[in-house]
Structures are given as structure tokens and as C-alpha cells.
Image: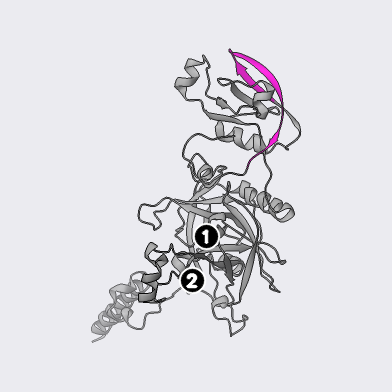
């Protein structure tokens, strides 16, 4: 009997030891371990100290949300509604007294109003709004609608067709304004938000990245230095804001590449560096004054460079000289290659256009040309750039300066 008790005690001890080892090292092998198991779930923390009437702001948005940037910028982006009167062309029969006597005035020629829409950015508490020239071009009436529901009539301060920028003004108190960012600090790959009124559906925010910088030679404007983005820009976004992830303005949305009228991920915005300079001139003087020398230029292709026995395509070929213009009076000739303006190197026709436009009319400027493979310095009295016609602004051919 005593031996049986010893055997039982040893067996129980071994069994308990095995159970202890299994429950410690492999508890999942025990059927009871799956019951009542504790599961730890990570949840986004909610700051209970936030006001209860603003549930959206109480959530920690994290690095993947741009809500704060959108909320900072959206109040300063407005919808711009324009309209103009279009007079109907009278039918010749309406001038016949017998026709009018028979039908009366029911066929009287009547005018109608055509409307369009765009966007704009409030840039100062005084009521100045930056938008595109093509948004307000030829408009008889301009109405601005703020994000808070207020509306007001606006009047044009001035516009610049060659950069497609315009400034309008409204008389409203307590206006939200946009903070200007530094477009020269923007890099390819930066995340950006486009804010505007696409297709008239109301204020909308889209997100993308900066796809390219310094886009030019697109035939959109005379002076081009665009930020390219894949943030969705559609009709109605023109004049709206392109902002960085802090809600600062870095560009004015102006154009898209599209075959269908919708966004294909190729949109262009005018940099704030250009927009601010043009805006300040318009506010101060009502327009933009640029230098002009009266030449037609084109880029140097490798074939042209070879024909002129040049090892580089740097510079701008002068293809034509306006008779009695500043360049003609100074002795510039077709076939000269312009390589510098006031000591600044000319890279291509677009660069030459910018350098000459920055000159002050009435002053004497020094340009450097290559003629017969020799550099020649020429002094020119700068003229004032004539106002362009619509055909000049949207031309697809060589630049004219």
C-alpha cells in the first residue's frame, strides 16, 4: 500500500511539473488558453481637452492629414463669377417695316448675358484679390463669393495678359488673407494642395506633388515660369491657390493640359515670385511696365549652332530687327547671337525675354552679341514694351521682344 502511494505521489508531481512547463512555455497548447484572452489594440488618441463643439479638431490628424493646411488656406480662396453682355446681331428682316408691322416686336433683337467662373486669392485685408487675367477678361460685372458665404461686387485694379495675372478689389471688412510662401524654395516631389471652384461645384481641395519646376516654352503665356503639379486642376480652378503643407501660397493655378476638359494630372501654376512682383506693380501703377528693344528671337538649335560655328546652344538668335526700333537704332543686325544683357548670360529666347523685360524704359542698357564669331558690346536705349494683342499673348511661334 505504501509503495502504491509513493508511485501515485511521484506521478502527480511529474504531471504537475509537465503542466507547469507547458502552461509557461506553450500556453496555446492548452484548450483553456484560448478563452478570455486579452487583446491589446492601438487606437488614435483623442485629446479630451479640446472643446467638445469641435470634434474634428479634437482628433490627432497625424502626418498623413493636411487638414490644418487646408483650413488655414481655404478662407482666403474665393469664387469669382463674371458676366458680360452679348448683343444679338439683328436679322435683316427686322429692318423691314412691313415685317415688323405684321409680326410686331416679338422678334425684336435682344441681348443676353454670358457668365463664367473662376477662383481668386485674397492677398491683403484691404480687399485685393489675385486671380487670372483670362478669368476677368472682358467682363462687365464681377462678383466674388467668400468661403463664409459673403458676396460682393468687385472692380478691376489692373491686369497683365502676358503673365495671365489680374488684381481685383472688393470692399468687405474683416477679410481672411493668404500667407505668401517662397516659391523658390519649392522642390520637385513636395506635396501641394490646389484650392478652387472646379466646374462650379463649390470650394474644393485636391492634393498632389510638384511634378516639375521652371516649365516654359508651352505657348500659354508670353512670360512663363510654371510650377507643374499633378494635383487635380479643372475648369473653374483658374486663379485659385496652390499651397504647401503649411497652407502658404506658392502659386496661382492657371492652366491644364487636357484633351477632354478634365484634369489629366498635368496642371500649371504661376509662381508666387512672379505673381507678387506683378501684383505689386498693378496695385501701385494699375499696370505692368516692361523693357523692350524691338527684336525677334529664337532658340539656337544644335543645327543652327553648328552653322554659326558655335560649340554651344547658349544664347538667342536674333531673327529679325524692327525698323527704327531701339535695337535697329543701336546697330543690332539679324543673325547676331545675343549672349548677355547687362552682364547676365542669356541661356535661350525665354531667358532673353525675361532679362530685357526687367530693363527700365528710357535707360541705356548694354547687351553683348556674337557677330562673325566675335563678341561685340552694344549700348541700347531701352523702349517701353507695347501692349500685346490677344493673338500675341497666346502665340505658339517664336518669342517676340
Q: Quadrant of the C terminus?
A: top right
**Kind of element beneath mark 2:** loop
Where's residue 162, x and y in %? 58, 46
Marks 2 and 1, how far apart at CA: 16 Å
How many discs appear? 2
Point out which mark residue 56 bears.
Answer: none
Q: Looking at the image, is mark 2 or mark 1 earlier in the sequence?
A: 1
Residue 334 vs residue 253, the one in the foreground: 334
Residue that carries the numbered disc 1 in the rendered image: 193
The stretch of residues the image draws in magenta is 367-386
**At 71% across and 67% down in the image, what residue appears?**
125
Q: Residues within 10 Å of mark 2 (few under 14, many from 20)?
A: few
Q: Are marks 2 and 1 in contact (CB under 8 Å)?
A: no
Q: Main secondary structure of the magenta part?
A: strand
Q: Is residue 81 left or right of residue 385?
A: left
Point out which mark residue 202 bears.
Answer: 2
Q: Residue furthest right?
A: 363
**At 42% across and 64% down in the image, what residue appears?**
90
**Kind of element beneath mark 1:** strand
Q: Residue furthest bottom?
A: 1
Amino acid at each position: 500500500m505504501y509503495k502504491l502511494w509513493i508511485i501515485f505521489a511521484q506521478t502527480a508531481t511529474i504531471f504537475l511539473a509537465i503542466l507547469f512547463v507547458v502552461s509557461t512555455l506553450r500556453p496555446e497548447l492548452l484548450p483553456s488558453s484560448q478563452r478570455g484572452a486579452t487583446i491589446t489594440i492601438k487606437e488614435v488618441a483623442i485629446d479630451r481637452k479640446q472643446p467638445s463643439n469641435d470634434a474634428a479638431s479634437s482628433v490627432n490628424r497625424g502626418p498623413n492629414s493636411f487638414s490644418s493646411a487646408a483650413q488655414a488656406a481655404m478662407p482666403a480662396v474665393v469664387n469669382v463669377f463674371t458676366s458680360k453682355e452679348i448683343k444679338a446681331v439683328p436679322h435683316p428682316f427686322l429692318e423691314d417695316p412691313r415685317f415688323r408691322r405684321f409680326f410686331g416686336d416679338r422678334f425684336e433683337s435682344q441681348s443676353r448675358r454670358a457668365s463664367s467662373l473662376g477662383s481668386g486669392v485674397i492677398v491683403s485685408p484691404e480687399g485685393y484679390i489675385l486671380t487670372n487675367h483670362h478669368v476677368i477678361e472682358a467682363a462687365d460685372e464681377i462678383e466674388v463669393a467668400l468661403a463664409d458665404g459673403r458676396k460682393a461686387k468687385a472692380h478691376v485694379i489692373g491686369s497683365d495678359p502676358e503673365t495671365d495675372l489680374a488684381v481685383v478689389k472688393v470692399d468687405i471688412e474683416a477679410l481672411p488673407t493668404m500667407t505668401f510662401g517662397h516659391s523658390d524654395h519649392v522642390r520637385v516631389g513636395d506635396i501641394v494642395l490646389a484650392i478652387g471652384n472646379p466646374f462650379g461645384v463649390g470650394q474644393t481641395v485636391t492634393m498632389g506633388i510638384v511634378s516639375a519646376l521652371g516649365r516654359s516654352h508651352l505657348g500659354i503665356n508670353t512670360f512663363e515660369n510654371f510650377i507643374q503639379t499633378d494635383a487635380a486642376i479643372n475648369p473653374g480652378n483658374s486663379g485659385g491657390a496652390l499651397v504647401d503643407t503649411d497652407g502658404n501660397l506658392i502659386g496661382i493655378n492657371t492652366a491644364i493640359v487636357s484633351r477632354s476638359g478634365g484634369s489629366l494630372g498635368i496642371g500649371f501654376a504661376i509662381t508666387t515670385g512672379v505673381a507678387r512682383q506683378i501684383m505689386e506693380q498693378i496695385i501701385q501703377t494699375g499696370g505692368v511696365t516692361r523693357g523692350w528693344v524691338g527684336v525677334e528671337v529664337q532658340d539656337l538649335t544644335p543645327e543652327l549652332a553648328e552653322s554659326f560655328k558655335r560649340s554651344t546652344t547658349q544664347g538667342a538668335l536674333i531673327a529679325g530687327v524692327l525698323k527704327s526700333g531701339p535695337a535697329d537704332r543701336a546697330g543690332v543686325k539679324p543673325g547676331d547671337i545675343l549672349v548677355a544683357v547687362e552682364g547676365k548670360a542669356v541661356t535661350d529666347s525665354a531667358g532673353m525675354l525675361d532679362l530685357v523685360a526687367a530693363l527700365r524704359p528710357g535707360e541705356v542698357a548694354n547687351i553683348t552679341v556674337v557677330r562673325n564669331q566675335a563678341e561685340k558690346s552694344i549700348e541700347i536705349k531701352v523702349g517701353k514694351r507695347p501692349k500685346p494683342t490677344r493673338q500675341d499673348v497666346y502665340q505658339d511661334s517664336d518669342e517676340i521682344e
